[in-house]
Amino acid sequence: MERRLAAVLAADVVGYSRLMGLDETDTVMRIATWDDRLVEPVVAEHGGRIVKRMGDGFLIEFASAVAAVSCAADWQERMAAWREQEAHGEPLHIRIGVNLGEIVIRDDDIFGNGVNVAARLEASAEPDGICVSDDVRRQAAGRRDLVFEDLGERTFKNIAEPIRVWRLVLPGQHLPALAASVVLPTVPVRRPGGRLVAGGGALGALVVILALWLLWPRGEPEPAPATVDPVAEAERDAGQAGDSGAVPDEKPAARDPRLALAVLPFNDMSKDHALEMHADGMVEDLTTDLTQSSDFLVESRNAAFVFKGDAIDVVAVAKKLGVHYLIEGSLRPVGDKIRINVQFIEGAGGAHAWALRDDVALSEIDAFRNRIAMKVIAFMLAQAGKAKP
């Protein structure tokens, strides 16, 4: 028998017995079709091996935790699109657990504690959810677009030691009130690698914003001064600066200087400025997406665009705009794709808090912008939590 370290993904169909009771033949045929057209492709794309199928469940092995978590996230996203396209039957929902541990291989099957923990994590996940172990979460920290919620230590049957459990937060989760009253339109968006997911441009980012806003612990809102509307004042100053073309004066401090940011113009690094329209549009849409949150202040587009084309001193610009964080980026052609670099900078010292880079097709820009918005919002909500007394 062979032993090795592996990432194990366990998944099952929620309410399988009830679905079989309603229509056994239809349920079996739908799951078989779904397995063939969705499960096998997404697992193959991430280098996984389907070890076995168990009617309503799957056991899948990966060489790395990052590959397993990326597969789980794509799987759930594609499931959402699949449910939109199905014309009949009760929607299929799955839950997923991912663990990193030692497994025993025998006759192409896998056994051991690593498998058992993955199965327990899957059982603890909510419908359409993903739960991972602490080891998986640490390994996946390199995927900066992933957001995890700490669910604390849990004790599972037949598992000797408590397991620290993390939930992967996916766009659109935990919005029961919204989902009950609003149907969000989706359009296909092709992500890097040719994968199709359900997206909705700025609306998709808005769902992400609302989801993270509802998940974050909140205190009492900080009252604004009775005679000053800081947002209106910032927009008025920005409009004046945009009309005159002058560099704006220093802004009054936001509700908390740690909770203010600006999206600076992205640089078009193509030879003939062919990407300028896409760069400006990305900045404008990203600014709009981020202003949907009331937990932090986003400087207006007009005020930020004053600095377009300038050699920027980020410390001086942050001071002039009265913000603590700056987002800057660039677009340049790489073959038949566009390389987008984005940096999130602490204005006080000019240090980079984090960065994202990817090569995307023109049709994938909206999906990449959604990743940026999700990461910015998660970071700023963390700062909002720290700033509360």
Image (spheres, rainbow, N blue to C red):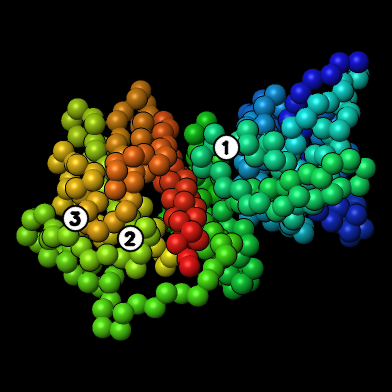
User: With 242 as the anchor, is 34 left or right in this view?
Assistant: right
- The residue at the far top in this view is 1
Query: Three-letter amino acid code at disc 2?
Result: Pro
Residue under the point 29% across and 48% down: 348
Distance Cα–Cα, label 2 vs label 1:
28 Å
> Where residue 255 appears, x then y in whole percent?
34, 68
Q: Is residue 242 visible?
A: no
Residue, disc 2: 257
Marks 1/3: CA–CA distance: 34 Å
- Residue at position x 87%, y 23% from top? 104
Of labels 2 and 1, earlier in sequence is: 1
- Image quadrant in which the N terminus is located: top right
Q: Is there CB contact under 8 Å for labels 1 and 3?
A: no
Task: Indicate left or right for 46 with 247 as reference.
Answer: right
Instruction: Indicate which disc residue 141 carries.
Output: 1
Disc 1: CA contacts within 10 A as few (<14), some (14-19) or many (>=20) = few
Q: Position of residue 88 (x, y in %)?
A: 74, 57
Question: Regarding mark 2 in the picture, which secondary structure is present there?
Answer: helix
Give the secondary structure at mark 3: helix
Could you say which disc has been placed on residue 349 in the image? Answer: none
- Residue at the front extreme, as displayed: 389
Depth check: give the residue in front, 31 or 221: 221
Q: How far, Cα to Cα, is label 3 from label 2?
A: 12 Å
Which residue corresponds to mark 3?
A: 320
Write down the quadrant of residue 176 in the picture.
Answer: bottom right
Q: Is residue 37 left or right of residue 255?
A: right
